[in-house]
Structure formats: C-alpha cells, structure tokens
Amino acid sequence: MSSFHRQGGTCEIITAAGRLSEVADILKQQTEIAVDLEMDSLHHYRDKVCLIQVSTRQQSWLIDPLALESLSPLAAPFASPETVIVMHGSDYDIRSMYRDFGIEVSNLFDTMIAARFLGIADFGLAALLKARFGIELDKKYQKADWSKRPLSREMCAYATADTSDLLPLYDQFREELVLKGRLTWAEEEGRLLCQARVSEKEGPLFLYCKGASKLRGHTLAILDELLQMRDQQSELLDRPPFKVLSADTLIEIAECRPESIYDLSLVKGMTSGQLQRHGDGILNAIERGLATPEDRLPCFPRNGKKEVQERAKERLKNLKSWRERYCQKVGIDPGVLAPNWLLEAVADTESGSAEELDAIHGMREWQKGLFGAEMTRILATV
C-alpha cells in the first residue's frame, strides 16, 4: 500500500488484500460512488484493466488489480442496488470489469449520457468539468501504458482527477434531468448498460475491418489472409493489430497485389521496419489469397434489407421532418433522441402500433412513451 499527494489531499493506492477489504466496507456505506478504469488497449494485443479509480464524497482511492490476486471485495458495493455507481462513458468499462473480474453494476448513472440528454454538445468529461467547475483536466496520460509499474505521481494524479469531481457533476445533472422530466431516460439507459458484456468476434476478421465491404473475389481473399497474418504477428509481438499494420495499408496491399519487396515498398504507409519484419509474410499471404479456389472465395455479407418501398420512403421522410422539429424544440441531438435506424424500423411497420413498437429491438421505453403515439399518427397520414 502506498499513497501520493494530490491537490486537496492524499490519494491512497490499494495493493494489499486486507486494505482492499477495508475500503470495500467503506464503499458499502455510500449512496453514490464515482468509478473509472484505466486500461492498456493501445499497447497490448489483449487489453486488461490496469487501474480502478474510486471516489466517495470525502475520499479517493486507486485500486491496483495488477498487484491484487482478487477484487472480489468490490463485488458487493458495486452491485448493490442501493448504491449509485457514477461513471462517464461507461460502456466498455462495464464490459471490462465483468470480463476481467466478474464484477457487475446494477445501479448506474452515466454522466456522458446525462449530458447528451440535457442537450450538451461538448460532452467529454474534461469539457464538462471545465464548464461546470472551472476545473482543467490534464489529458497527458490518456494514451499511456497503464500496465507499467510503478505508476508515477503524475499518472496517479491524472487517474484520480477522473473521479474526484464526478459526484458533484452527478448532483447537477440529476437535478437538471429531474427538472426536465428526463431522469427516467438516464435510468433506463443505465439499466441497459449494466447488462453490457464483451463478446468474442465471430466469423472472419474482414467483417471487422473498415473498408473491407467494398472488396470482392480474390481481393477480399487476399485481405483475409493479410488480416490473419497480422493477427498472428500482433499476438506474437503483444501489440495491438493497428500498430503492426494499419487496415488502410492492408486494403491497399490487397488491391495492388505487389509481387516483390520492392513493389511492397511503394505501398503508401509501408515503413522500412514493417518491410523488414513482415515483408515475406505479406507476400506469402498474397499468394495464398490468389490461390484460393473460386468456390471458396470469401464474400462480405451484403445488406439483406429489401429496397425501401415508396410508401416507406415517404413515411421515413415525414418521420425525419418531425424529428428535426421536435429536436429543435427540446434541444437534443437527433441521434440521441431517435437515431436513423429507429426511424427506419418504425417506417417499416404496418401502423406503428404499440405492439409493433414493442417488437422493435433496441427501442427504449422512454422513447415509446415520449413520442410513440406521435409516430403512429405520422404513419397514419401516408
């Protein structure tokens, strides 16, 4: 166990199981806890949680999971329905806590979601703390490798700043959401986020490669081989795939099909180091892709959605016009209130009845209650 001094007091770094249990007992007595995580996703093949920041209204701690065999004492206070866990941009943090430690959250308030429901355009934590409290966050260590030890005092101060002022922000946002009648929106989003889990990628790697959908035939087969080669090298080197070879570079290689190291050196984005380390592997991957038999060529799934009929097009146009007027009135971004996919799903229903809206996967209860009847009325005019 160690500590570092920060502005306003000392923050303790928890590295011992006994002290973690004591802190967990303190957390069990709280009605709200601010939580944030630091990970190493920019530096390793498989990312992991490297630090958990926790703040009450009186105190902050940095919990070091790399020094602790188990974080099980945190399970009870984090999962208590009586304790609000306040986070900012919590989606991947919720997934990662469950993946790495089996820790669940049941009562979540996400200040980023709250900010968006309040119509705040600049909803990053640094911008919010500056606007609300005049606090300047130093984002110097945003892309740091948090798996390295020991942590510097500056890194600890950076990490603590992400939670030390989060509860006062929660207080303001909660009150403003109540005044606007939108607290139930944030609560529903929080309940859904609590169920988020990390899922393993299924299917070929090109399904997750931006820009791959434009490729066909042997060009896609080459890209598939290149992505597999890159993934193997990434795991071997323990580096994120994008730091081994960028997706843009791989797509250009698949399209150009270089036949030699010299040809490969002319590809935009290729460095001398990459040529030296991966040149032969790239050329071999190209050969394997070109040798793929016609009946085994990969195919990028095409959007199976049928052509939108004229009636549905008109409905969608009317729904978007309504959304634009409504969002101007309430001061919320259209993508937050009713994203395009939702309007398209509504336009494809027969009448927009309550039963049909209930069948739309992903439509929120707050959305149905807020404008479900209005959507039904709009559909009835076409």
Image (cartoon, rainbow, N blue to C red):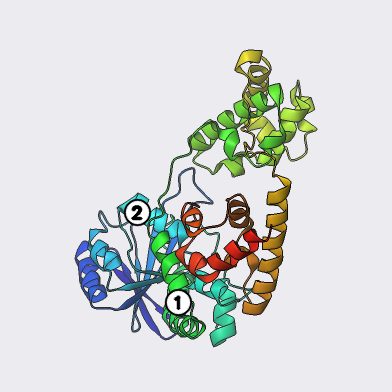
Where 6 sits versus 90, above or below? Answer: below
Residue at the (58%, 40%) spot, across then down: 208
Front-most of residues 191 and 329 = 329
For mark 2, give the secondary structure.
Answer: helix
Front-most of residues 62 and 175 = 175
Using the rendered view, name the quadrant where residue 193 is placed.
bottom left
Residue at the (58%, 62%) spot, across then down: 376
Asked whether the viewer can see residue 140, the reply is no
Where 344 sits versus 320, above or below? Answer: above
Front-most of residues 76 and 321 = 321
Q: Position of residue 127 (x, y in %)?
A: 60, 76
Residue at the (49%, 69%) spot, across then down: 369
Which quadrant: the N terminus? bottom left
Q: Label 2 is placed on what type of residue?
A: Tyr
Where 273 sits versus 60, above or below? Answer: above
Res 183 label: 1
Tag 1 near tag 2, CB within 8 Å: no
Residue at the (69%, 32%) spot, across then down: 275
Which quadrant: the C terminus? bottom right
